[in-house]
Amino acid sequence: MSVRVDQEAILRWLREAEALGWLRPLDGALAEFLREQVPDAPPLLLLAAALTSHQAGRGHVCLDLDQLWERAEPVLSLPPETVDAPEPVKSPAALLDAAGGRDAFERQLECPELVGRGPGSTPLVRDGPRLYLRRYWACERTIARVVQQRVDAAAQWRAQLDPATVRRWLDGLFGAPGGDGPDWQRVACAVAAGSGFSVITGGPGTGKTTTVLRLLALLQGLHGGALRIRLTAPTGKAAARLNASIAGAVDRLGLEELDGGAELRARIPTEVVTVHRLLGAGGGRRFRHHAGEPLAADVVVVDEASMIDVELMAALLEALPDGGRLVLLGDKDQLASVEAGAILGELCARADQGGYWPDTAEWLEAVSGQCIPSALIDPTGGGLDQHVVMLRHSHRFGADSGIGRLARAVNAGDQAAVEAWGYGHEGDLARVQLADGEQDPTLIHWAVDGGQTGLGYAAYLSDIQELRPGPDASAGEYAGWASQVLETHGAFQLLAALRRGPYGVEALNERLAAALRQRGLIRGEGAWYEGRPVIVTRNDYGLGLINGDIGIALRVPRFLVQSPEAGGAGEERQKVLRVAFRAADGSGRIRWVPPHRLESVETAFALTVHKAQGSEFRHAALLLPDRPSPVLTRELLYTGITRASQWFTLLEPQPAVLKAAVRQRTVRGGGLRAMLEAAG
Ligand SMILES: Nc1ncnc2c1ncn2[C@@H]1O[C@H](COP(=O)(O)OP(=O)(O)OP(=O)(O)O)[C@@H](O)[C@H]1O
């Protein structure tokens, strides 16, 4: 039975949902704005607009109406982070039902002044079962158009290559082909060499970086070293990380052994910039480079492409010159961008199955010498699938690695394998039950002492005391100390799925600080104390800090941070608290920042998995909450597990939560795939 749900009832619900923190003020403001534009706007349309905006704020480009009707709660993640809606606020699903079901809802979305079906100026766009804010629809359309142009031009790109020459180069770079099954790294180089647009996806340690560097050597080899190549990553953190590792990775390629290898090496760039910098971010929203002023680049490589959002991707694709080649690298199974868009996931939707056409497989064999397994050949595959390669072998986590096995099982949704994982510590994995809920001292034992691994926070806090430079130490010695403390700190990280509640990072940070104080590992009250680890939550160009940077508060002599050359004694040697950050340029230099200058930082004893994306720790411990939550998904678990390079610990109060999380997929609304299929 339907009840009357009028505009006032909807707007009241939106205000209540906002007061509860379920929706952002922006979401309700959109509904109010639409009502001002069209005073008799259908009430459910106002609700749908607010929910579309809510989805955009949570990383969804659109509101998928089919999914909304199937399972509103996980799709909207409402009520958030808790399972029960406090009475008397209805869940949105109950509200929709009360309003008369899907037919009534669909009828109310027919409002041409506010909802368009394509290009135009309405604030909302309806495309199939998807409802978009116009801006996101336009971005997705741009991405689909540019990708489709390049997919359509595949034959021309391949025709420019002589298969025998490519094969010779690949043999030089990879050695003669051999081994069981195809070497997907070679296949990836072949796919990307024969295409203006390609995607190389793979889990941790599958060799994405190594492969792309070989690809660049191949392309430079084929073009006489004349290509202008740009390396880029969506976040400053990811760019800095690649910057720090790329020179070493180029060295390991062994290019010197090739004819002309030294010149080739010199033609492979090692500088990685953010996509914003590449495009020339100014003060406003427009970039310096766009369709009318394309980038001066022949090849653009985007690392960590799973973290790129639709707006940035659309801007990048528009700025790509016609003959420019784009290569996206990333792990399709990781959590997607926090901003709107799960582009890599959508582009790689069929990467596991291959979907290569027989003539693609034939061409790939001719140029790479690798035979594509018949299970991955499909004459009905999509055009886009011919441009996607998945690296399937991890060089970091071999068959005997527990972390690798667990990550694969979680990723595949293999509940039996996950359930078979018993409590205890074996090899590189530990599964620990917290019998006494969030107050269980075992949690502190693992976070502070690292359990059997010995890698917990006590290690860096001890370094602070034990390695502290003597009274006459130089600025360089202080920097060396800070560098060591940051290094030891970076070996361990406690991760949590949630922000709020007893198992969320906020409560954990407080609990850990109290436990460390009790142990005498940190001293002093107040917000700032020596040893406080902080994470930067917003880019601060003035200070040269980027979102995701981690620093540690340390006591240093005043002279050091005011005028390092001055030296000094007595008064001058008085200690002040400064936060030590590693400079982002990969130089390892230490920057000392006064705490009061840091406007957007949070304590980092515990981090959400989202925040830790793009980082890696020797030991990562993931704490699950005591009951299922819409945010606790397979992708979140996988991303958490793969942050660990040597040891992974799962801390859980309730074994059922892990099982539920493995079953639950992150639902991302997005129509890129549908747009490409419609165009192809
Ligand atoms: N074909 C290969 N043979 C042997 N070792 C390899 C091969 N490819 C990569 N490696 C090694 O595996 C490790 C991981 O490689 P790489 O850093 O390229 O992977 P990635 O996928 O970029 O990793 P990440 O998870 O950091 O993104 C490196 O030590 C690299 O030298």
Image (cartoon, rainbow, N blue to C red):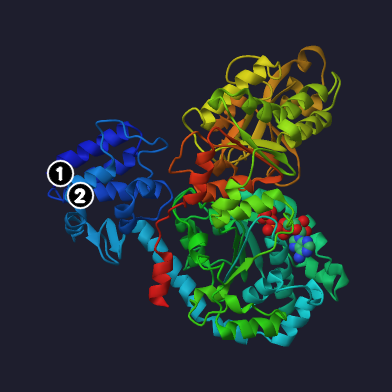
Answer above or below: position of 174 versus 31.
Answer: below
Q: Is mark 2 on a helix, strand or loop?
A: helix
Q: Which of 584 and 559 is in front in this view?
A: 584
Q: x%, y% of residue 322?
A: 53, 75
Answer above or below: position of 381 versus 117.
Answer: below
| Quadrant occupied by the C terminus | bottom left
Question: Of the numbered discs in the image, which one, if any, rests on residue 44?
Answer: 2
Q: Which residue is drawn at 21% across and 47% down?
A: 97
**Mark 2 nearby-residue class (10 Å; few <14, some 14–19, many ≥20):** many
Q: Nearer the viewer, residue 118 or 649?
A: 649
Q: In which quarter of the image is residue 649?
A: top right
Q: Which amino acid does label 2 sit on?
A: Leu
Q: x%, y% of residue 282?
A: 50, 51
**Mark 1 nearby-residue class (10 Å; few <14, some 14–19, many ≥20):** some
Q: Do the residues labelled 2 and 1 touch (CB within 8 Å)?
A: yes
Residue 34 visible in rendering: no
Q: Is residue 663 left or right of residue 191?
A: left
Q: Is mark 1 on a helix, strand or loop?
A: loop
Real-space Cα distance between discs 2 and 1? 8 Å
Name the residue that disc number 1 marks.
5
Q: Which amino acid does label 1 sit on?
A: Val
Q: Is residue 434 left or right of residue 263?
A: left
The quadrant of the rendered image in which ligand 1 is seen is: bottom right
Q: Nearer the viewer, residue 103 or 657?
A: 657
